[in-house]
Structures are given as structure tokens and as C-alpha cells.
Amino acid sequence: MAVITGYYRYNDIWFAWPDALPGEDREALKAFLAHDSLVSPDHPFNEGDERGVMLYMGALANGERRLLVSTKQVSYARYWLHEMGLTKQLIPAPYAHCLLTTPRDLVSADPTFFAQGLDLKNAKKNVDKENKRLKKSHLPVVLSAKHDLFSRVREIWQAKKGIWIALDFEDWERDQTLLIEYGSSTTRWDNELEVNSHRHVILEGTPRNGKYVEDNRDRYQFGVSDTVSLNTLKQQVQTLFSGFQKAGVPLFLIFHDYKDDLKRLRRLGVPVETARHLLPASSTDLKFDDVYIVDTQDLFSALEGQKQKRKLKVMCERLHVFGSAFHNAGNDAHYAMLAFKEMMAHEPLDEQRERRWPGQGVTVEHPPVESESEDQGGYEAMFGAEAMPKE
């Protein structure tokens, strides 16, 4: 017999399932599912994680959210109650038509932890409120796709799979085909230990910005800048990428607005034509020779629930990743990596959005700031006029 792995709506498990059982079995199941009981360290669902009991937050195709319980948990509940003598017989499973599976019914199902019974109660209320707000919004399909992207990237990152490299480039302000700086920030894992490296390169003999774009090439914040020829940089970058692909793990390229940066990578001789934008549903589906593109603009847009894409400085400011001397390729690559980690290392999207901007709902509205429309104004707003580079 085929075994289907899927999820049941928490509401169906909490209300409908017990009501379908005879008296004594019903009361035993209700006690098992009680909020304070579920979060207890002694509950069978609790696997010793200090974060509490793990349930799931699911995203439907229309963008709505559902708190979920897995089929594994439902099966365990049935057998545990019977083995403990709390039910006279093995209680029947919930109706099969209540079962949700991915990708047929669900876009994603994120593990979500609850340490207190009140947290679980509030989560259910918040999900209901968010769904009501979503039905009134005009962005359900857009938000659903972005939520799916955020969830997939987060699951793979937290599984510590692959090599992740944030890249940034600076062109000459008068000729965008003339590369003047290159920056990278890399994270990988060695026996579960995170290993980080970063680099800033100035192309020798190139002109400086300063009239239309800030000139911060001499203000790299994370080490010493290298000055090399364009041919040398091409050889170094090609060697770097070939080494990554020989490592036998997937490669993730992190950009903040990837379109122009991909063109620059191609000009450096890095073949990125086969790089994918759609990540697999699970980290277990990754292949060692896969190359994926991850854009922090899209991830932050998902977190805010906004169509509008934010500039790097604005995104970092709102994530409390503060820095200085933007428009230095090394700095920008590193800040993009820090912002990426700040989003991916924490809770699932909905819980994270509520923690960062309480009470905002599906779509976060911020007061306008100068840095969204004008680079220099945003720089002054964040770091003060005295920190501005002089022309």
C-alpha cells in the first residue's frame, strides 16, 4: 500500500476529528491536543527541541496560510493513545479528503515551533486574521509566489546545504560596460561549522566615480582591497567558480537585483546560462551540480509583502543590518550576505514579519524615506552628512 505524506489543517484535527469519535475516545484525544498539553516537554510530539513542539505553517496556492499537523504526527497520536490504554481501540484516521499534500494542495509547509500554549492559541488567531486581510488585498497570487520562494530558500539555508556567494559589481558612472570594482562574500559549511570569506577588488587603471555615484572604492570595511588587471580578475573568478563546482555541492549565487550582475559575470567568462531561479521544494532534492540564483530584493519583497523592490541600503536599514560606505562592491556584497542571513536564519516568513513589524498584517507599510528615491539622501539619513565621501 502506498503511504501518502501530507498535512491536516490544525482546525480539522482540533475540532472535527474528536467530534467523530465516541465519548471516552473523544475526551482522550481532546486532552492530547489541548494547547498546554501539546507544548509540554513530556508530550509525544515534542522531540526534545528547546524551541518547543513543532507544527507546520502551510501556504496555499491562493496565498492563504494554514496551521498544519503532519500525517506522521496524526498516526503517532493514534498509536500512542492506544498503546497507553487511553483509547479502547485504534481510533480511525481523519477523512482522506481533509489531507493536503505538496505540491498538489500546498505551496509550502514550514516547520513552526511553539513553546507556550498561549503562543499556539495566538498563532491560530493570527492566521485567521491574516487570511481575512489577504482576501481583501489585491496581491494574493504575487504574495503566494514570493512566500514560496522565501520558504524554499530558508529551508535549504537552514539545512546547511551548498556554497552561497553574494556578488556585487561597480561600473563606471559614465559607461556601465566598464567594470571598476568586484566584491564577494562567501559562506559554506565544513562539518557543520560555518566558514565565511570575503573579497574586494579594484580594477587597475580604471576611472573613479563621484559625480553621479558615490566613490567609496577606498572605503572597504572588511579587510584590504586587491588591485588587479581585468584579465587577472577574469582568471581568478573563473578559477573560483570552477572550484566551487568541483566541490560536489550546489552553488547559490546571491544578488541584490540580479539582472545586470549576471551580465557582468558572463563578461568575466563565468557560464551562468544554466543557473536556475526556481529552487526545489526541499533541500533533499538538490543536486551537486546545480547552480541557483537568489535575489535579496525578492526575498525582502516577500517579507514586506510588497511589490516594490527596495534598494540595498533601505533593506539593510529595515533589517537592522547597519553599515557604511555603500557603493563599494566589497561592502555591498557583504551587506547583501548579512541581510540574507538575517532573513533566512530566523522564523518562517509570517512569524518573522509579525515580530519585526507587529500588527502590520500581510502587507507592511513603512513611512517614506529619502533613501528610497535618492541614493545620497538615504546615505545622509543613515550615516549623517559628515560621513559623506567628498568629491
Image: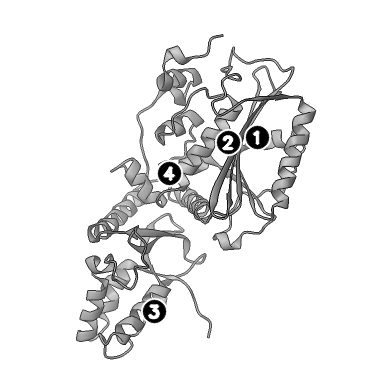
Q: Are marks 3 and 2 in contact (CB under 8 Å)?
A: no
- Which residue is nearer to you in this view: 171 or 85? 85
Within 10 Å of the Cα at label 1, are there few (<14), some (14-19), or many (20+) other Cα atoms? Answer: some
Q: Secondary structure at mark 3?
A: helix
In the image, what residue occupies the spot 36% across and 81% down? 93
Answer left or right for 178 relative to 77. Answer: right
Report, in whole angstroms, how far the alpha carbon at label 1 lies from the one at label 3: 49 Å
- The image shows residue 12 at horizontal and vertical percentages of 31, 71
For disc 4, the neighbor class at 10 Å (few under 14, some 14 to 19, many from 20) is many
Q: Is residue 95 left or right of residue 265?
A: left
Q: CA distance from mark 3 to mark 2?
A: 45 Å
Residue 179 at x, y percent in the picture: 70, 25
In contact (CB < 8 Å): disc 1 and disc 2: yes
Q: Dot 2 corresponds to which residue?
A: 257
Query: Which residue corresponds to mark 4?
Result: 303
Residue drawn at x 58%, y 58% as measured from the top left: 280
Mark 3 lies on residue: 75
Viewer-side residue, 373 vs 347: 347
How many angstroms separate mark 4 from mark 1 (CA)? 23 Å
Q: Callout 1, which amino acid? A: Asp
Q: Residue 106 at what x, y percent from top left?
A: 46, 63
Looking at the image, tell me whether mark 4 or mark 1 is earlier in sequence order: 1
Q: Amino acid at mark 2?
A: Asp
| Mark 2 secondary-structure assignment | loop
Circle 2 residues within 10 Å: few <14, some 14–19, many ≥20:
some
Do the residues bearing badges 4 and 1 touch, measured as CB atoms within 8 Å?
no
Q: Which of the labelled discs sits on residue 261, or is there none?
A: 1
Q: Nearer the viewer, mark 4 or mark 3?
A: 3
Quadrant position of residue 265: top right
Select label 3 or label 2 by which is in front.
Answer: 3
